[in-house]
Amino acid sequence: MEYILLTFFILVVILALLFFLSWWQFSQLGMQEHKLKMERILFLAKYVSNSPYFIKENSIFDDSKLTAAKSLGPGICDDFESVFGYDWFIKIRAFNGDTETTCTWTNYPDCNSWKFCTKNQKNISRILPVNIYRKIPEENGIGIMEVGIYI
Amino acid sequence: MFQIIFGIVVSVFVLYFLIQYASNYAGFQKDVQKVTILKNLKITGESVYSYGNPVDFPDTSRYDFSSCYMTINKPEPPVIKCDFGEIGSILTPMLLSVDEEVVVDRTDLNFGWHIMHWIEIMPETVILFTPMDSSDEAWNLMKNLTEALPSTENLDIKVSFGFCDVNDVMEDLCGGPCEKFSFMSIIDDHRGQAERCRASLPGEYKLITISNSCNPGFSNKGVCVKLPQGGVGSAYLAGSGETYIYKDSLDIIALLIGGSKKDVLGKTLGERLYDYKNEVWGERLSLAARIMSKRMLLVSSEYQFLGENLECIPIYANLAGSLTSIANQAKGNYKNEVVMRNLVTRMREAKSLYQNLIDLGCEYYV
């Protein structure tokens, strides 16, 4: 009788150890998920800042390219999925002392804001200072870029 | 006696269960480690894409990744597929061949009005040329291919260059192995026609034969390349009966570093990499051309309104038209020589128009 009880308790301890290892593995994966989201945002920030679709040279956006991309319509987000992935957005705002005005085909270059793939959805983001080349009148300016992902 | 037997039975049962779990866990962890190494390789590739500095990546020597290849995964982004799993969302265009330690470098396709970055991931390799034609076109082709391959001057994993003529393998032409820049400086000193390479080449050697006699069975090693006409030519990969149309160096490099090894479906990894390269190239070129076409019209209409740079306005209009054609043709059949030749003609035209704008001070170098 004692041996049966002993065996039973040994088995319980072994099973508890196995469950503990599995739980540990899953909780690690959960923490990993948040880290991956942050890494993705940082990658997007670097990637967009060096993307030939938007820049004049490394880390300097070209406002005419941004406006041209924007003027292709909301469908451009579907085209950008193969380049930048899913569920992301960027907002770029140039500092020129004026109120925020979204750039369109008709008001360029008297505008200072570009938004891509924005949705009314929960998200996490980061804000970074950026350089913006104003094609007309050919001068460099500064601004901020908010890059984020939807969760 | 009963207690002894009972104890043995219970012990065997517990041990069997534990060993089973431990071996499954070990196998699972091994795959987890392989996936982690590939994820790190992906992150390294993304970093090199952004900053352009080549790096070594030694972790791939720990396991066998030779089954891994790049593939399109529409509507999702491309993935790296291996026999043990896959890594998704590869957003940076990559030409990948993983065997032992690898070097990660960036190369660019410059269209004049747009630049397209590509990551090259390849193991230590010796690239041998067999130019069976000594013309300027052959030498320019070799220089373009060399220029597009990784520069490993300050790295441990080396990509070096040489020639092969029948059984003579010339790989120490620079007082030692020739890396990219040193090979470029001596390549013109070795002008001459070679004969088909018949030397026995170990696995890290990749052969590029240049001849207008290339056909599917011409060479049983590496890639055989016909000289281009109008910027477009055809290439043949050993082990594959297909004709591959090329319009830039990366088409040939994709075949070369993908290689002749076949996957479970009997397709060479070189062909898979070539298909991946062209799908990504076509999609991105089309998107870039659409954006830039709009930009040309936007800028020219603004210059018109302001009365500035009026000499550039007709060039902007022509360039916008060229880019619209490129946007439409870029996703065409990349295996069709006529389609690709038309596209290359349009691209040369666009490049020339953009250069005119730069010369007039209306645009900048990309």
Image (spheres, rainbow, N blue to C red):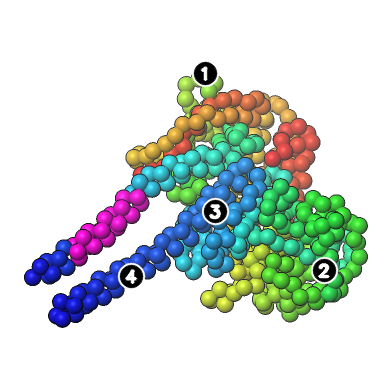
Is A84 magenta? The answer is no
Question: Percent position (x, y) of residue B223?
Answer: 73, 69
Tally the marks: 4
| Left or right: residue B291 compared with residue B245 | left
Q: Which residues are magenta?
A: A10-29
Q: Secondary structure at mark 2?
A: strand
Question: Percent position (x, y) of residue B280?
Answer: 58, 57
Q: Earlier in the sequence, mark 4 or mark 2?
A: 4
The reply to whether callout 4 and callout 2 are in contact (CB within 8 Å) is: no
Q: Secondary structure at mark 1?
A: loop
Q: Nearer the viewer, mark 3 or mark 4?
A: 4
Outermost top residue: A97
CA gap, disc 1 to disc 3? 44 Å
Is A16 magenta? The answer is yes
Question: Percent position (x, y) of residue A103?
Answer: 52, 31
Looking at the picture, which amino acid does disc 2 mark?
Answer: Val
Could you tell me which chain the residue with mark 3 belongs to? B
Outermost front residue: B1
Q: Look at 77% across and 54% down and name the residue there.
A: B179
Q: Quadrant of residue B201?
A: bottom right
Evaluate whether residue B347 shows in this view.
no
Q: Nearer the viewer, mark 1 or mark 3?
A: 3
Q: Earlier in the sequence, mark 3 or mark 2?
A: 3
CA gap, disc 3 to disc 2? 33 Å
User: To which residue does mark 4 refer?
Assistant: B19
Q: In this rendering, do the residues under marks 4 and 1 share a single chain? A: no
